[in-house]
Image (tube, rainbow, N blue to C red):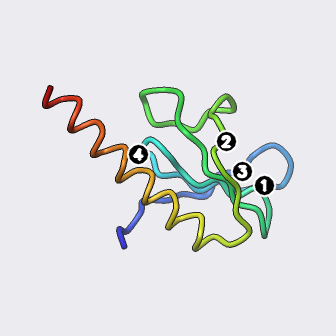
Amino acid sequence: MNKQKTSQRPLAGNCARSTVTEESYYVQRLTEQVFVIREHVSGDGEPRPADRIIKSFDMSHDAYVYVDMLNEKQRKLDAEKRAE
């Protein structure tokens, strides 16, 4: 599995955020047991409140496995698009 660059940042309330800034999708930790997959809306890779929520998980491992799969598919699609 890929090592991910993550950071903990405070959110409104007492939530923390884990982000993968080089990818299209990232995991956001909302509570101890709620993790959501979000899609970056901006090209700079910074998390934004307007980022679309894709899916939620109650285990961080599952969320990170899923986000890795999404990002890998996105990289393949981007490569195919560049090749055209």
Mark 4 Cα within 10 Å, few/some/many (few <14, many 20+)? some
How far from the left and from the top, in percent, is residue 54? Answer: 63, 45
Mark 2 or mark 1: name the one nearer the start of the chain. 1
Query: Disc 4 to disc 3, how far (Cα)?
Result: 20 Å
Q: Considering the numbered disc 4 on the image, is that residue within a helix, a strand or a loop?
A: loop
Tell me the residue that label 2 is attached to. Answer: 53
Q: Considering the numbered disc 2 on the image, is that residue within a helix, a strand or a loop?
A: strand
Mark 1 or mark 3: name the one nearer the start of the chain. 3
Query: Disc 2 to disc 3, how far (Cα)?
Result: 18 Å
- Quarter of the picture holding the N terminus: bottom left
Tell me the residue that label 1 is attached to. Answer: 15
Query: Disc 1 to disc 3, how far (Cα)?
Result: 6 Å
Residue 17, compared with residue 4, is above or below; it is: above
The answer to which of 4 and 68 lies nearer the viewer is 68
The answer to which of 78 and 34 lies nearer the viewer is 78
Type of the residue with mark 1:
Cys
Residue 52, compared with residue 58, is above or below; it is: above
Label at residue 10: 3
Label at residue 23: 4
Image quadrant in which you'd find residue 77: top left
Query: For the point 69% across and 32% down, which residue is it?
Result: 49
Type of the residue with mark 3:
Pro
